[in-house]
Amino acid sequence: MSDMLNIGKPVQKMDSLSLATGTERFTDDFHVENPLYCAILYSPHAHAEIKKIDTSTALKVPGVVDIIHYNNVPRVLHTTAGQGYPEPSPYDTLLFDRRVRFVGDRVALVAAETVQSAHQALEKIIVDYKPLEPVFDPERAMDKDTPKLHVDDEHAMIPATYEPEKNLAAEVKISFGDMKKGFEQADFIEDHTYKVHYASHCAIEPHAVICYFDERGRLVIISTTQVPFHVRRIVGQVLGIPVGMIRVIKPRIGGGFGGKQEVFLEPLIALVAWRHRRAVRICLTRKEVFVSSRTRHAMRIRLRTGVKNDGRITALDMDGLMNAGAYGTHALTVISNVGSKTLPFFNKIENLNFCGRSVYTNLPVGGAYRGYGATQGYFAFNQQIDTIARRTDKDVLEYIKRWHIKEGETSEVFKALGEGKEGVAQAIRSCKLDECIDRGSEAIEWYKKRAKRIKVGKNMVKGVGAAVSMQGSGIPKIDMAACSMKMNEDGSFNLYVGATDIGTGSDTILAQIAGEVLRVPTQKIIVLSSDTDLTPFDTGAYASSTTYVSGKAVEKCAHDIAEQLKKVASGMLGTEQKNLFLDSEKAIDKNTKKSVTFTDIALSSMYEKDQFQIQAHASQTVDESPPPFIAQFAEIDVDLETGKLKVVKFVSAVDCGQPINPKLAEGQVEGAAVNGISYTLCEDYNFDSIGRMTNPTFWDYKIFNIRDIPEMETILVGSHEETGPFGAKSVGEIAINGPAPAIAKALYDAAGIRVYELPITSQKVWKLLQEEKPV
Amino acid sequence: MEGLFIINGSEKKLSFDSGDILLNVLRANGFTEVKSGCHEGQCGSCVILLNEELVNSCQVFAAAAVGKDIVTIKGIGDIHSPHPMQEAFVETGAVQCGFCIPGVVLAAYYLLKNNPDPDDEEICRALDGNLCRCTGYVKIHEAVKLAAKRMAENV
Ligand code: FES
Ligand code: FES
């Protein structure tokens, strides 16, 4: 890689100085003339029927312009999941419904001349609810006598199991081999049940939307979205207006993590704008984000493994029950991913069974969240592996190295299980997991600390734990990315990408890729991204797809430009095109060393001879989804007296292929790992007996601050993925998978207690220390 | 009501209601570089300097800030001549989505003003009121150290 100009270099993120000096604009920073302000009324009941809604007094509040609710808006079933079309998530959502299904479900929206009027009017809306029996326990959701949440014409758009009459939002099953035989061959069976909990994405920027009409009467939507093109499609669908009438602009986004892959706010605000032909705006409060937006799906996972005394797994049965919450957004695809991202990991297990179900409950709605099922699955998987390795007297790291999927190998699961449908067969072309394990274990001093229970204080003991995982790079045969590019007189290039930079730095890495192909510094590439009027289509920022899918589109596009440059240069130099190569912003004849600068090429093509615009476009879909791999290590100190647990050091060693920008890649890993540690130790949704979240503020829903973080070490283990742009794979999600299992395993290492249910709070540790006989 | 504020060195006459929060008044008048992440005093994205003290502007009534000196992120440097702290954040890769960054940078700027050579613990204490969900704080910490080093060299 030494002759690389941009790739593998810590190029400065192109918007970082403008962000640090405060000139960039986020959605709520845009000014629009004379907008209507919105406030939303939410259900105080977990499950109820609205008998009557009386807005007469509220409408009299000065400044109130409109109040919309189930009685006066079109009834269009849709999903808020910002996914490709047809969406794998069921159509079970209306803008407003007669029935409310969780505390926080929307009941009405007030549009008014001022924020104050909107809020005053909210309090004057009188709603007569008929409370219905709620369903809180996912285990009971499918019981015969349990009330059902979706009983009208809700339906699935793709041929997948969807049985709302059973509260079943999704079901996925695959099976290989002979489970009975597999368990019979086993010397022992490990059978454990793991639970992962609710969480909020906590992007520091809350969801916001602004709608206005442009000079020609088209609807413009500025939104905090990860999926601008899906927003355009879904708003068109719900409002019944042509997509051509809508323009969606994604400005700077203050973090997404999956939470802004949901199109739940845009249709509402667009509807108000459309009804009144006026600008409209909303910015959610933190409480609204916690309660009414989307969450990490809570899950119960039971793992049964038949194991030989030598450690070979003869059968593995994974049974997952996911709490979809009140609506089935991502219900099918997240549960699919629980299986599809974890089960190929140990690809030599012949007898395999996976059953995953997503069920409706009257609790907050799950959705896409960084890790997307893999986080849930790997918590169970890694702990199970630890148990097996300990029981068979093996070092867990050696055990993982022995059994994990390797380069050149495949797994039947890839083909059997995709995103809500069959997957795509693929063999692993790049996997440097062993190196990740070696370098990570060295950094944490694994063999010095593992099983040593080093005392570090009166009652304090040290433990170390490790977790491994893999993710994907985009969704094969579904994701699509496109871009276009043109050249300017000075040898700079405009790059237009549909890809959605939500703070990750994708604008920068896409520019690095284009710059590398053309052999110009990244600064010469001017990026404009995600404006549905100006840029080509892209499915959006999710599924760890941007580098791998959008990046490849950019690489292809830049190659096309390169050929055009050479063609013009060959005329100018009087040499054959095939003798030319690009370097230092010149086209150079490899034989004569004669050259012509990009500036001269541009000037010639624009003004002098055979005039044309040097420009190109490209699209990219993918046939495989090469997984990045990661090994993560937690070192903890635990107080055996009080249960207080402190993560002292956390190491992530990741194989993400060729990192396009090591600094940005590290940033992704560090951010995801800290989010994961915070999730493991202190984040949780507390519910009262009526299903209401009782801690919807940063005071009570604690997330890590700078004082809470352990010593962090990130190791990028380079590999080369031949199908990726310059050898790259993804890196955005994977590092959130390891913290929970690594910390849980470190706790066992230190104190001999195993936590099967997240989060791992000091109280829980203390209780386990009292109840269990630590080993 | 109306009041005179000195914002980033220039006098501004702004109108507001008696119960209005400073953060909202600033944003409504175009100072949108002051962000709002929670409105409850917990995230630090609304941080400003008020008479040289670091405050969460969502916790201050506009009326209480009349006549006072307000510094936002735009007041310490701009895109053409950034402050060394802003440059350090760029160089270390400490800016991801950047939503928290105006607050974080101001908090770090304030720290170095009062303590030009902070140790790790002091950096953490100074920034513990600023939540960031993107970076994991690792590069933010590095940025502050780099800025301290640079600024010490340049005095
Ligand atoms: S907006 Fe002021 S502290 Fe969060
Ligand atoms: S950079 Fe996104 S919240 Fe800090």
Image (spheres, coloured by chain):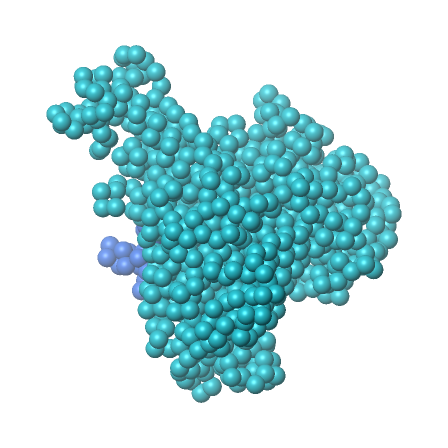
Chain colours: A cyan, B blue
Q: Residue at x 45, y 52 (%)?
A: A410
Residue found at the far left of this picture: A592
From this view, report whether residue A207 is shown above or below residue A373: above
* x then y, percent, for residue A375: 53, 59
* x then y, percent, for residue A464: 42, 74
Task: Identify the image quadrant of residue B113.
Answer: bottom left
Q: Residue at x 59, y 41 (%)?
A: A83
From this view, report whether residue A519 is shown above or below residue A302: above
Task: Judge whether residue B30 can be spotted in this image.
Answer: no
- In this rendering, would A185 be left or right of B53? right
Task: Judge whether residue A307 can be spotted in this image.
Answer: yes
- In this rendering, would A100 be left or right of A476? right
From this view, report whether residue A361 is shown above or below residue A597: below
* x then y, percent, for residue A85: 61, 36
Residue found at the far bottom of this picture: A458
Callout count: 0
Q: Residue at x 39, y 25 (%)?
A: A616
Q: Residue at x 60, y 20 (%)?
A: A216
* x then y, percent, for residue A344: 49, 56
Task: Identify the image quadrant of residue A557.
Answer: top left
Q: Along the line of sight, which residue is nearer the eye, A61 or A306?
A: A306
Q: Along the line of sight, which residue is nearer the eye, A496 or B107?
A: A496
From this view, report whether residue A546 is shown above or below residue A602: below
- In this rendering, would A615 be left or right of A690? left
